[in-house]
Amino acid sequence: MNNPNNTNRENIIKLRELINSSSNIVFFGGAGVSTESNIPDFRSNDGLYKSPNKYKYPPEYMLSRSFFMSHTKDFYDYYKSEMIYPKARPNDAHIVLAKLEKERKLKAVITQNIDGLHQEAGSKEVLELHGSVHRNYCMDCNKSYPLDFIMESKDIPTCTCGGIVKPDVVLYEEGLDSYVLDRSVYYIKNADLLIVGGTSLTVYPAAGLLHYYNGNKLVLINKSATDYDRSAKLVISDSIGKVLKEALSK
């Protein structure tokens, strides 16, 4: 019977070889990248959607456009309590990816996360499919506001013009930004190595971006199986931060 530790070590060596032999790497990541920074994901057993809910409505509804428009104060109560983690800091995955970009091997990070930790770690080309908590804008005059403005607002964040300030975060019932999608497709199409980490690949249209990959070096790093495992050159079932750190260690 194979020792799982030996198998993982062998896979990390294979990943190191793939990284060393590639010059156009793209990383596509999900909530599992940020769980190691103590930000909960959504769908795991400990995730936001399965945790005890102290609110009157299910989380999926509270994070929808219709709920934001009809129950704006309740939305902000939930959003500020459950979606913002000001003490979170970049973990090994964020740091390794920033290092790969600095070495000009990694061309882009495409993320479903909204926490801004990739940029905090030093990554420059970050495509945020679902937006960012750090960008907020007035729905009337489009004036921009930082996250602190949202967190310090006593009630509904309101612009100097009187309009509601909304996070630049994609809610349910809203479409993804077309520019971010187009850039993501461009990078994935041209990647020689596509590393996918910390995502179950069940959220569309984001997961559908993998269909644009033309290469033969798809690597999946996730603690649970995905529908794309059979298409991958390499599948590693382990912590994304641990795997990337070990793969880049000499």
Image: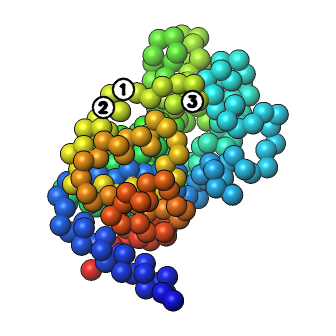
The circle drawn on residue 178 is 1
Q: Badge 3: how crowded within 10 Å, few (<14), some, or many (20+)?
A: many
Task: Please tell me whether mark 2 or mark 3 is closer to you in this view.
Answer: 2
Front residue (pair 179, 136): 179
Cα–Cα span, label 1 and label 3: 15 Å
N-terminal-most mark, 2 or 3: 3
Is 97 on the left or on the right of 80, as rendered? left
Q: Residue 58 appears at what percent x and percent y?
A: 75, 36
Label 3 sits on residue: 171
Q: Are marks 2 and 1 in contact (CB under 8 Å)?
A: yes
Front residue (pair 74, 18): 18
Q: Residue at x 36, y 26 (%)?
A: 178
Helix, strand or loop under label 3: loop
Label 2 sits on residue: 182
Q: Are marks 2 and 3 in contact (CB under 8 Å)?
A: no
Please, what is the three-letter code of the amino acid marked with disc 2? Asp
Q: Residue 143 appears at what percent x and percent y?
A: 45, 18
Please, what is the three-letter code of the amino acid marked with disc 1? Ser
Helix, strand or loop under label 2: helix
User: Which of the 4 image quadrants contains residue 216?
Assistant: bottom left
Helix, strand or loop under label 1: helix
Q: Residue 203 appears at what percent x and percent y?
A: 52, 41
